[in-house]
Image: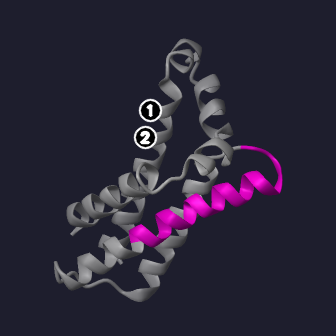
Amino acid sequence: MFASLFVLLYVAHLAADYPGQTDHQARHKAEPGAAGWRANLAHAATHVLLCALALAVAVLVLGLDLAAGPAALALVWIGATHAVIDRRWPVQRWMAWARQPGFAQHGGAAHVDQTAHVIALATAALLLATL
């Protein structure tokens, strides 16, 4: 069950992060203030919507037994973690703490960002598989 859920959530994540993200959201989601948060939360909402569709596929197509409460909790977790990670400061702080300035200067932040999202998705899938 974990593997199926993780793959479905990861595919939903890719769809939301790339074809589902507008240029405006990508440019402004980390900016301070209300405009930055609006872009950020609109992008996070896309993730929640597509992950909800992925969980519906898990139930309707794969026949997985998912309780509504844990599914809602997983979706809140996905939306919240995605919004925080995409503010960019967590990735920047991690890379500074891990002493990765060279990696950061050569595009490493995008890899650390995606790794953080994958960890959050794996946590959600693990939660769903165990509850």
Pick out the residue farthest to the right: 33
What residue sits right under mark 1 in the picture?
111
Tag 1 secondary structure: helix
Residue range corresponding to the magenta coloring: 31-51
From the viewer's perspective, is residue 42 above or below residue 30? below
Q: Quadrant of residue 1?
A: bottom left
From the viewer's perspective, is residue 16 above or below residue 27? below
Give the quadrant of the C terminus.
bottom left
- Whole-percent x, y for residue 78 in the image: 50, 63
101 and 1: which is toward the camera: 101
Residue at 58%, 45% in the rendered image: 26
- Whole-percent x, y for residue 19 in the image: 41, 52
Left or right, 93 with respect to 47, comes to: right
Mark 2 is on which residue type? Thr
Q: How far, Cα to Cα, is label 2 from label 1?
A: 6 Å
Mark 1 is on which residue type? His
What residue sits right under mark 2 in the picture?
115
Q: Magenta span has 110?
A: no
